Amino acid sequence: MLIDTHCHINTILRGYQTKSMYTPLTIDEKILTQTILQHAHDHDVQLIINVGTDLIESITCIKLAQLYQNCYAIVGIHPNDATQYWKNDFQKIKDYVKEHEQHKIIGIGECGIDLHYEDYNLERQQDVFKAHIELALEHNLALSIHSRDAAQETFKIIDQYSKEDNFRGIMHCFAYDESYAQQAIASKLVLGIGGTVTYPKNETLRSIVKNIDLASIVLETDAPFLPPQSMRGQKNSPANIRVVAEYIANLRNISYETVAQTTTANVKKLLKLSNEVA
């Protein structure tokens, strides 16, 4: 079996839009979700972790987890979605996390530092990232860490917490070099690897994925974003975890079953999922 550790079914259903309150899933949205989940199951993907990027999307992730047995939630505020009012939204997220087992919340994020767009507020992003890490440590949950064009800035924060016994997480959509990969692994993080490993210009990432210990890799799609090369221009789907797993198997010259079994075991250990799950 395979696990998609980072997916946005909430975004597939509703796209990006300004939202002031959560609205229940419609019948059409539930039908589409069931179609997505069945398609994934048909491709050996038996567990999907939906990741929030703001309060409303985090609530949608929780609702999906409550509706569907093979869905779990990671909740938080993306660095690009951290407004001046982020503390109010984060307090509401914290209220859900207090009962994380009931809500099937198994991680905090996606959180981190993103300096890609010129209008970033680094000080705010740093404050938001620290708040997420502290929440994860308080409840013994893993982190889903987003870092874009912010290698040093991200680790400036991580280094303040990584010596804590229960600090752990996923470096989502890993996109840096080999030394950074080793730094992440030394800080008890694993690398989230998705469709970008198949992109022609990503030779550095392929080299990392080929040579590091498979115990340091988990699989993700970031659907509906970043589909594998063979599907560029299309919406990504959790089912495409199978494509990524097979690609990594060929890259490392090992069996698909080895990639599936090892990465699944990595996820269950990191996120403290029982072996009976899925």
Image: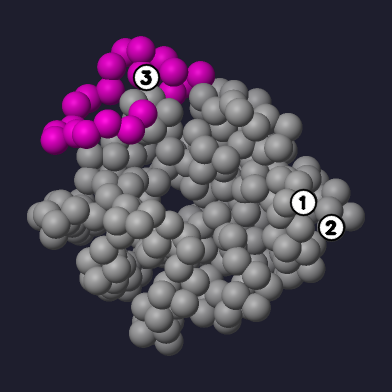
223 lies above or below 233 = below
Kindly report which numbered mark, 1 or 3, lies closer to the viewer in this rendering. 1
Residue 238, given in percent of the width and then of the height, sits at 56, 35
Residue count near mark 3 (Cα–Cα under 10 Å), binned few <14, some 14–19, many ≥20: some
| Residue 138 seen by the camera | no
The location of residue 225, given as percent across then percent down, is: 52, 38
Q: Which sits in the foreground, 97 or 227?
A: 227
Is mark 2 in CB contact (under 8 Å) with mark 3?
no
Residue 125 horizontal/vertical position (percent): 28, 65
The image's mark for residue 252 is 2
Q: Residue 34: within the magenta?
A: yes
Which residue of the protein is positioned furthest toward the top in this rendering? Answer: 28
- The Cα–Cα distance between marks 1 and 3, rounded to whole angstroms, is 32 Å
* Mark 2 nearby-residue class (10 Å; few <14, some 14–19, many ≥20): some
Q: Residue furthest right?
A: 253
- Can residue 137 be seen in this snapshot? yes
Residue pointed to by mark 1:
248
Name the residue that disc number 3 marks: 30
Q: Amino acid at mark 1?
A: Ile
Residue nearer the viewer, 150 or 218: 150
The boundaries of the magenta stretch are 15-35
Q: Quadrant of residue 124?
A: bottom left
